[in-house]
Amino acid sequence: MAAPRTLATTALRAGLLLALAACDGPQSALAPAGDGARELAGLWWVMAAGALVIFLFVLGCALYATRVAPRAHPDFAGTWFIVGGGVALPVVVLSALLTYSFVLGRDLSATLGPEALRIEVVGNQWWWEVRYLRPDRSEPVVSANELRLPVGEPVELLLSATDVIHSFWLPSIAGKRDMIPGQVNHLVLEVAEPGVYRGQCAEYCGGPHALMAFYAIAEPANDFTAWLEREAAPAAAPEDPFLEEGRDLFHSSGCGVCHAIRGTPADGQLGPDLTHVGGRMSIAAGILPNNVGTIAGWIADAQHLKPANKMPSFNVFSGQELRALAAYLASLE
Amino acid sequence: MAGAAARSSRARATEAAAEAVRAPSLATLLLAPAVLAACEREEAGAQYRVFGGNPEFGRALIADYGCTACHAIPGLGTFAGSVGPALDGFGARAYIAGRLPNRPTMLTAWLLDPPAIDPETAMPALGLTEAEARDIAAYLYTLR
């Protein structure tokens, strides 16, 4: 007797923990930190509450019919019940919810003028290209796998994809929006509180889809502007001989065929732009913290860490060369 | 929070192991040679105590630094890197990186600056502080 009860208690605890696990953290639709997410969380609570009321009502009816009055009821009661509860009620409730969600969806996909900050996010297997379009219409600032956002300012995201359908999902800030090749979808978001939030590709896009994530860093508008200025600058040339060795290895090993480092001959477009890779929070699309060690590990064995991703494992360098290459990339802040 | 629960139960296990590392009983100390002679490896010997190292912090630091990008480390689940050696049973290993006798002072020195000890190593210096290196060493010695 004791064992099943313990088991049941454990199951219940586990269930509760799982249920609560979704309530906070950097990637939760139930911990909104932006306007869009707040409205979506509101919609979710309305729907959940409505579903609960209807569920309890149906359960009450079932109990009434089986326990309280388990007998045949007059025909007119049955007819009223089916027409009222089976047709009229769902039509009214579902129409209201549909209208509510349509209006909300329209607001979220509104477009802002060119004077607003607009950011192109392009889904690739299995990383994100991020291009900041500046209001002065100068060259976009290209980055990858991380989204910087000013707090308290509406930002328009222009979402697309190069290969297959991906889906942009930053649960704490905004809703989910598909990224479709050959089409641009719009998503307006506004972050209310500074912080680090996590997003993820929400549409299965093949192979290591589960390892296609990103961090969004929301900071005060002044800090954001200063960051964008730095991000727009080309990479600084290394001065330390060890870093110079790393830079030379980068170019002589052909890394620049796929990766760009602005200010150097490397101008590849197949993989993430690495001009300021050392300044990002994570590498390999949100899956590893960013430091000289994880960069070295990624270069040496990218295929083991993120199987089938498009970067081969380069275990061709000596230990010292690998450290130099990783140190050079980590220095690109 | 489920994760947190799993973490705390793992942390308890780690803590218990750390307790064994930190406070060997008098009997253990007296019997250590005999125990070692019998190849008994249930309890870590005094030589594995890392002064000031907290294995629980060490485990968190290993996750923060992403050591698993290169090493498979028991108790850290996200990745099991195969660039460097797997670290299961590290507390019972004789040598560090095939270079240094496996002792706490050697291990912290290695963690702080691997290339200073082996210029050919692929493992970079991660800029750990001395305290961080001790915590990580303390965790690695719980792996037996």
Image (cartoon, coloured by chain):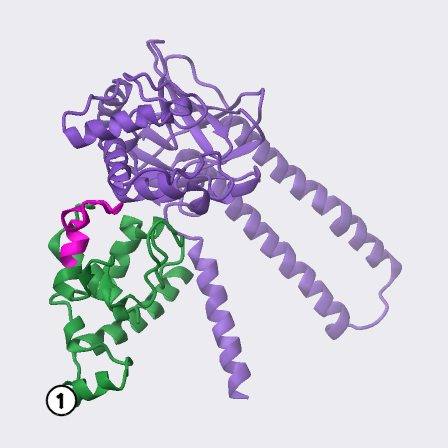
Chain colours: A purple, B green
Could you say where residue A101 lies in the image, as x and y percent from the top left? Answer: 57, 35
Residue occupying the far right of the picture = A75
Seen from the viewer's position, the closer of residues B81 and A167 is: B81
Could you say where residue A169 lies in the image, as x and y percent from the top left? Answer: 48, 37
At a point 47% along the width and 67% down the height, the residue shown is A14
Q: Is residue B122 magenta?
A: yes
Q: Quadrant of residue A142?
A: top left
> Is B131 left, or right, of A296 in this rendering?
left
Q: Relative to A49, is A281 above or below? A: above
Question: What residue did someone put label 1 on?
Answer: B30
- Is residue A29 visible in this depiction of the protein? no
Q: Relative to A243, is A44 above or below? A: below
Segment colored magenta:
B108-124
The subunit carrying tag 1 is B
Residue occupying the far top of the picture = A137
> Is A13 left, or right, of A243 in this rendering?
right
Q: Is residue A332 magenta?
A: no
At a point 37% along the width and 46% down the height, the residue shown is A26
Q: Does dot 1 land on a helix, a strand or a loop?
A: helix
The amino acid sitting under disc 1 is Leu
Seen from the viewer's position, the closer of residues A286 and B27 is: B27
Seen from the viewer's position, the closer of residues A179 and A64 is: A179
Seen from the viewer's position, the closer of residues A234 and A69 is: A234
